[in-house]
Amino acid sequence: MAKFTTLTSHAVPLPAENVDTDQIIPARFLKVTDKHGLGDSLFCDWRYLKDGSDNPDFVLNEAASQGAQILIAGNNFGSGSSREHAPWALVGWGFRAIISTGFADIFKSNSLKNGLLPVEVSADVYKALMEAVQLDRSTRITIDLPTQSVTGLDGLEATFPIDAFSKHCLLEGIDQLGYLLSFDEQITSYEQQRT
Amino acid sequence: MEPRTLFQKVWDEHVVVQEPDRPAVLYIDLQLIHEVTSPQAFTGLRERGLKVRRPDKTIATMDHSTPTLPKALWVIDDQAKAQLAQLESNCKEFGVELFPLGDSRNGIVHVIGPERGFTQPGKTIVCGDSHTSTHGAFGALAFGIGTSEVEHVLATQCLLQRKAKTLEVRVEGQLMPGVTAKDIILALCAEIGTGGGTGHVIEFNGSAIRGLDMEGRMTVCNMSIEAGARAGMIGPDETTFEYLKGRERVPQGADWDAAVERWSQLCTDEGAKFDKTVIIDANKLEPMITYGTNPGMGMQISEPMPTLESFDDFSQQAAFEKAMLYMDLEPGQPLLGKKIDVVFIGSCTNSRISDLRMAAGVFSGRKVADGVRTLVGPGSHDIKKQAESEGLDQIFKEAGAEWREPGCSMCIAMNGDNLEPGQYAVSTSNRNFEGRQGKGGRTFLASPLTAAAAAITGAVTDPRSLLLS
């Protein structure tokens, strides 16, 4: 997993609530056997017109969105299915962090395993950041994981929560399976006790 | 000892290691695998040179991308074919038991787990599928995981987990005729919204829950995730034991008696505290239906749809407007009488024998309305066989419905069964998200009774009007 320390980027505003994983990547793209190459299918049904061309009205297709690494989206982002294809598609497009007032549990857990940082902020901070980004799409936001802070324009600064273990894994680029495997002895003794 | 909830008891039993400031290492008793969310996990194992730690605690099936037409008519695209082939070779290589497409034990993962007795009270159960919450109906702690975690469990039989909070949903009273388990869970989704249970495990209790059979309880727990909760649980009781007794993979003989005694301890202790409680009056429930684009956008079938003024929050208003636009519906109007194009009866939510019996009761002696396409998909081959032995397939076919093979079918629309753009469907599945049942398709979620009633009349219909006549 790629390390995450500090990220400064312009952002893509998506002010919709309850963006579900079927919107992030529809089920018909889940027939793959690989994690890579899903960025082109991200938000597919919003992003492309019937003939397959870009929908000019969808924010991801705007020139100002290109190269952005931060997505700002409405509450309960990532609700629905457990598909890890959702963070794979977001990371595949180029996102490294998502700012919202809330994330669905499984989506959050999947994101943290793919170097995609869920940044949970208060409704006020969300509103201020969303407005600033919508007003000026070149607005740059800084997300600093060591201090768990997000900084926008005009001195706007807020902190966000993250559990100590996930933070440690992201900072070091550690993959959690390695950590789990280190408990082999304890797992074996647990299995022996129970049988 | 402090009084504990059912969740706490199952959790405590499965903590292998709990280091300070670290998630618990939680032991998993059963992992269910399917073709869509497992290929990358097996690839990961191979890359690291790891084995499946406990193939004996791992079961695989094919359900999501599988066709539901008879074998002679199968059309499987190359991508899906490759995915199915990969599951087969992965299971062979790593020694995992697989119920492949066409096998008599094949079916939807959350249907066959309980049906074959793999699902048992007190177990921790995971699957790369959010509707794993279904198995909580047996007093198991069961939840959906991502593919990275599928790999974690394959390699170590454990998961890193932080303990969830608990939400008690108490459903008291008696359901009126025509009101089903599906209506209970749709009412909960409407009440607390799709994010209402985030961070929580739900425990369902109360007299209306106790009054449900296991299939109804599975329907309720299945859609816990639609209320934002990863898991929903119901304490095991006589109904649970009765359902499980004699099933293929449950303990037999003296081991059965010992298991029942152990399982009987799994109820929430008197005085145990939940972090939150929601109470639903079962006596007042009516058949429910969704009008919008998430399962929280639901209402009693006789009500008019909300209007913009029904929401005080700006972002909720925006979400409502967006949903109405996608659904092409008029706020404030009733849904009753709205013409529909398709009816889907099936999915891990409502494809069990009692669901099919309910639907067949409405279809019996009647015809599907002109121009309505109706698909009925049993959840497994066992259910299909049972339904056919009861003549339910004949009732469906004579009414003009399509009697399909087991699979996820039109719930997920990645297997050849899907809505066409603009079509309206009444569906017994679990998600009405934009495009969920096919790009541009529009879904009204409801019970098997309500879905069957819509098939007969060709419009959204209160099923009680057909039950009485």
Image: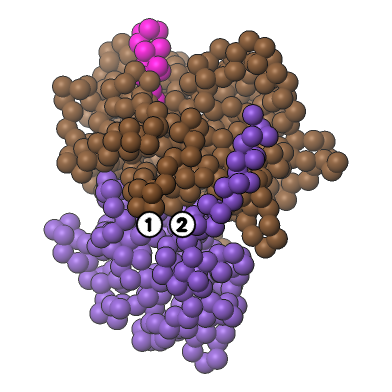
Chain colours: A purple, B brown
Kind of residue at disc 1: Ala
Direction from residue B389 to residue B438 in the image, left or right: left
Residue at 36% of width from left, 64% of height from top? A90
Establish if B197 lies above or below A142: above
- From the top left corner, tell me how far across and down residue B134 is, in percent: 52, 34
Quick one: B221 or B29, which is closer to the camera? Answer: B29
Which disc number belongs to residue B54?
A: none
Establish if A193 lies above or below B431: above
How many badges with numbers are in the image? 2
- Disc 1 designates what residue? A86
Residue at 31% of width from left, 27% of height from top? B100
Direction from residue A146 to residue A46 in the image, left or right: left
Magenta region, residue range: B378-391
- From the top left corner, tell me how far across and down residue B286 is, in percent: 56, 33
Direction from residue B287 to residue A192 in the image, left or right: right
Which disc number belongs to residue A110?
A: 2
Residue at 42% of width from left, 59% of height from top? A19
Looking at the picture, do discs 1 and 2 lie on one chain?
Answer: yes
